[in-house]
Image: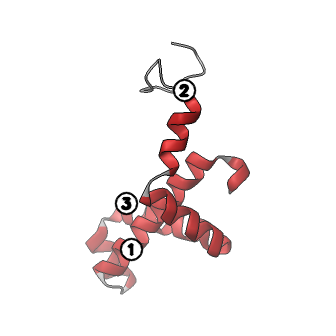
Amino acid sequence: MAASRRAGQDAGEPEGDFLASLTDTSLYSIGAYFADRHPDLVDDVIAQSTDIEVQGLLDYARSEGVSVETAFQTLVTGLAVRYFKAVAGAGER
């Protein structure tokens, strides 16, 4: 396997096809939409989603005075933005 290939990638699959397949997901679309519409909030939503991961969904919702559903939406949005940034690379942020 060539050194330039990422771990877990099949030796026969071209890297471009694999990366393109990652953009064809709902998570990527959510992240791209949020990053495009709210570029000033990207760092904040990532930080909030990290806090939710550390504290747990219920504890975060209670400490922030928000519903569990709102906390979950923030978590998913933050994860989606991180996914989008990782797949798209520095040129798309």
* Residue at x-position 47% and y-position 19%: 12
Q: Regarding mark 2 in the picture, which secondary structure is present there?
A: loop
Residue type at mark 3?
Glu
The disc, 2 or 3, on the residue closer to the chain's N-terminal end is 2
Q: For mark 2, does the 10 Å Cα neighbourhood hold few (<14), some (14 to 19), or many (20 or more) residues?
A: few
- Which of 70 and 52 lies nearest the eye of the viewer? 70
Q: For mark 3, does the 10 Å Cα neighbourhood hold few (<14), some (14 to 19), or many (20 or more) residues?
A: few
* Residue at x-position 37% and y-position 60%: 53
Foreground: disc 3 or disc 1: 1
User: Is residue 8 depicted above or below 31 in this figure?
Assistant: above
User: Is residue 50 depicted above or below 86 in this figure?
Assistant: below
Disc 2 to disc 3, how far (Cα)?
Answer: 34 Å
Asked whether the residues under the numbered discs 2 and 1 touch, taking CB atoms below 8 Å apart as contact, a structural biologist would say no
Residue type at mark 1?
Gln
**Whole-percent x, y for residue 26 in the image:** 43, 60
Residue type at mark 2?
Pro
* Residue at x-position 38% and y-position 66%: 52
The disc, 3 or 1, on the residue closer to the chain's N-terminal end is 3
Q: Is residue 80 left or right of residue 59?
A: right
**Whole-percent x, y for residue 17 in the image:** 53, 35
> Where is mark 1, residue-wise?
73
> Where is mark 3, residue-wise?
53
Q: Regarding mark 3 in the picture, which secondary structure is present there?
A: helix
Which of the 4 image quarters holds residue 69? Answer: bottom left
Foreground: disc 2 or disc 1: 2
The residue at the far right in this view is 91
Tag shown at residue 14: 2
Disc 2 to disc 1, how far (Cα)?
Answer: 34 Å
Quarter holding the C terminus is bottom right
Disc 3 to disc 1, how far (Cα)?
Answer: 13 Å
Q: For mark 1, does the 10 Å Cα neighbourhood hold few (<14), some (14 to 19), or many (20 or more) residues?
A: few
Q: How many marks?
A: 3
